Image (tube, rainbow, N blue to C red):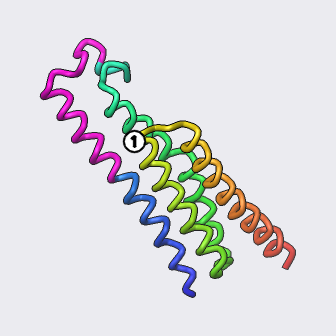
Amino acid sequence: MSPSYLFLPMLVQVMLTMSVFIRLGAAKSKAASEGEVNEERRALHDDAWPEPVIKLNNNIRNQFELPVLFYAVCFILWALNTTNVFVHAVAWLFVISRIAHTIIHTGSNFVPLRRKVFTLGFLLLAGLVVIAFISVVTHGAA
């Protein structure tokens, strides 16, 4: 399996983030056109917007938490040529967990389920970090 295939789950994660930005723009336009926005507070306060906008906005913030670490560790793994079927599978599972997290977060927002999915993604990412750490130490000793 080509090491560059590790960029595929990363690109899907980027597309997920972009899709939430697009949805956020559409939700904000709809809310503004329907008069659901507190115009005095909209520039600085999230609570000026209706719930669907707040959920999307909160999810955007989440896309710049664990996924940023995911990008970093994937680049480390790629640079050290430490990719294999297992690493690719874990990377894809991480992205699938982020897609599920986004669906829950912007939909029902049922926190117990959202937390479980987030924790799964965290553990998958932690596994990639351990692999990257071992690879860095091993490459440094060689």
Q: Residue furthest right?
A: 141
Relative to 7, 54 lies left or right: left
Q: Is residue 137 above or below residue 66?
A: below
Residue 39 found in image quarter: top left
Q: Quadrant of the N terminus?
A: bottom right
Q: Over which residues does the magenta segment extend?
A: 19-41
Left or right? Give the position of 2 relative to 137.
left
Asked if residue 26 is among those painted magenta in the image, a careful observer would answer yes
Q: Residue 10 placed where, x, y %?
A: 49, 65
115 lies left or right of 29: right
**Tag 1 residue:** 106
Residue at horizontal 39 percent and vertical 42 percent from the top? 107
Farthest-out residue, top: 40
Q: Is residue 32 magenta?
A: yes
Q: Residue 131: percent from the left, percent from the top?
A: 74, 68
Element under disc 1: helix
Q: Amino acid at mark 1?
A: Thr
Secondary structure mostly seen in the magenta stretch: helix
User: Percent from the top left, x then y, of residue 22?
Assistant: 27, 48
Q: Residue at x 60, y 42 (%)?
A: 115
**Mark 1 neighbour class, 10 Å CA radius: few under 14, some 14 to 19, many 20 or more:** many
Compared with 135, 102 (above or below) is above
**How many numbered callouts?**
1
Residue shown at the point (43%, 66%) measured from the top left: 11
Q: Is residue 38 above or below residue 57?
A: above
In the displayed structure image, the side of residue 139 where residue 10 appears, left or right: left
Q: Position of residue 28 (x, y in %)?
A: 24, 33
Q: Nearer the viewer, residue 61 or 77?
A: 61
Q: In front here: 11 or 90? A: 90
The residue lying at 37 percent from left, 59 percent from top is 15
